[in-house]
Amino acid sequence: MTIKKEEIKAFIAETSFTEMDEIKDDTMLFEEGIFDSMGLLNLIAFLEENYGIKTADTDLVEENFQNLNAIEKFVASKMQ
């Protein structure tokens, strides 16, 4: 299964009411106020459903979800 960064970006934009062109691969989602803890929970549910991964409590660190690049890397590591 291929990780579709644009699909993840679209989900983030839709759920955070942010324009897609404002979200770059390295946009810091939490620091820039695009995402909060509730947004993170929704993102995790989306990733688990769409990519068939399971997120452990130990995975819930900002480094895994701080931007699109980090999210892509995280999902790829869980798919192995």
Image (tube, rainbow, N blue to C red):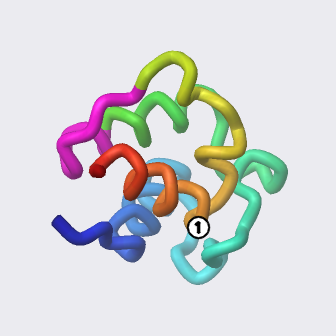
Task: Write the residue at 39% across / 29% down.
Answer: 55
53 within the magenta span: yes
Helix, strand, or loop for circle 1? Answer: helix
Q: Position of residue 51 (x, y in %)?
A: 22, 50
**What kind of residue is marked 1?**
Asn
Residue 73, percent from left and from top? 51, 60
Closer to the camera in the image, 67 or 64: 64
* Residue under numbered circle 1: 69
Question: Relative to residue 76, is residue 18 drawn left or right?
Answer: right
Outermost residue, top direction? 57
| Residue 1 horizontal/vertical position (percent) | 16, 65
Q: Residue at x 46, y 67 (%)?
A: 9
**Magenta-span inclusion, residue 64:** no
State the residue in front, 20 or 6: 6
Name the residue at the front extreme. 80
Q: Quadrant of residue 10?
A: bottom left
**Which residues are drawn in magenta?**
46-55
